[in-house]
Amino acid sequence: MKKRKHLLSLSIAVWLAAPAWTQAAEAPPATPAQTLAAPADAQAQAQLGYRYETGQGVVRDYTEAAKWYRLAARQGHAGAQLNLGFLYDNGRGVPVDHREALSWYRQAARQGNVHAQALLGCLYEAGKGGPGDARWHRPEGPGDAVAQKLMGALYESGTLFPRDDLEAFKWYRLAAEAGLPAAQFNVGLYYEQGRGVAQHYAEALQWYRRAAAQGYADAQVNLGYLYQQGEGVPADLHEARRWYEQAAAQGNPVAMYNLGRLDETGKGAASGNAEALGWYEKAAAAGAPQAMERLAAIYQAGLLGVAPDPQQAQSWRLRAQAARAGH
């Protein structure tokens, strides 16, 4: 069963704009870009960029994310400047360009964005900043958790620094211990996969639980999977479903897909063809290619009570290919 997400996609993106905005559940349903972001509304443009970067209510599209971040950044939106810089550092939706990334980080830092300031301090200490960046602080101890997590992501991606799972884990752990749910998720994933640290499912479970308790949907998905598989904890399908449902309520497409699989295989509380098909359709609408592929198989073979429909099956296959290609 599919469950994992790439560390540097929706799991890593950090919303660094208006403090009142949250990272997941409070966003309204997706609407066309024209109605969500007026031409001069930098905050709405930045929010839309975040939606596209994380796949919240729309199919994830880093090119669109960069476009909307840029519109907001050019109007002086510090959070968008920082997030746009991070896209340049990791080559997401734009070519890798570390100079351009530093330029956006500095613009955000000069406006007083403490996360950008802390990140520049880290980069300077690591020999990747410029002489003017020496004035910015490097977070130590509890420090600036967001900057610590971003440093972990840069070591994980291998674009700015040589890829180093030990360094990435160190930075993620600092941010996780400070309470940042996205970093707690990453620490859990490193423990689950044995990257930068010995594989330890029970540790992974504990870190996922911390992030999940703060409403972090990706952690809820992976926590549900550990309960489903009995890794680090006795298998418990009821508990697995509970966590999947919490993530699905936030629009997480992987959780929706996993609920569909539970229902299709008769392991769900309300198992049945209609329930499974409904979850697959919701997951596909939210951009999950694995759900599109499952729908293609269902319509091709006439499963779950639907009549065989090769044309519908081919349509879902093409949509899945486009989704996996990032279109």
Image: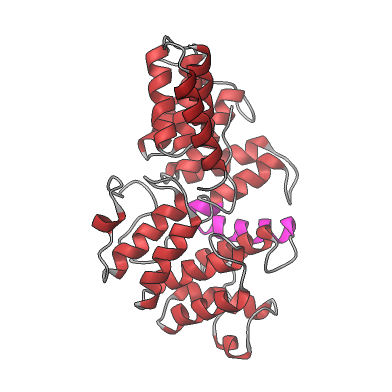
Majority secondary structure of the magenta segment? Answer: helix
The magenta stretch is: 164-183
Decide: is 238 above or below 173: above
Decide: is 250 above or below 63: above
Write the residue at 60% across / 68% down.
Answer: 89
x and y percentages locating residue 298 in the rendered image:
50, 17
Farthest residue to the bottom: give it.
131
Which quadrant of the figure has residue 95?
bottom right
Image-based side of 309 in relation to 32, left or right: right
Image-based side of 211 in relation to 2, left or right: left
Question: Which colouring convention does the figure follow?
Answer: secondary structure
Which quadrant of the figure has residue 67?
bottom left
Nearer to me, 99 or 165? 99
Which quadrant of the figure has residue 92?
bottom right
Decide: is 201 above or below 145: above
Residue 74 on the magenta segment = no
Farthest residue to the front: give it.
311
x and y percentages locating residue 207 in the rendered image:
56, 44
Write the residue at 27% across / 68% down.
Answer: 39
Look at the image and tell me whether residue 136 can be seen: yes
Write the residue at 67% across / 58% down.
Answer: 156
Image-based side of 67 in relation to 156, left or right: left
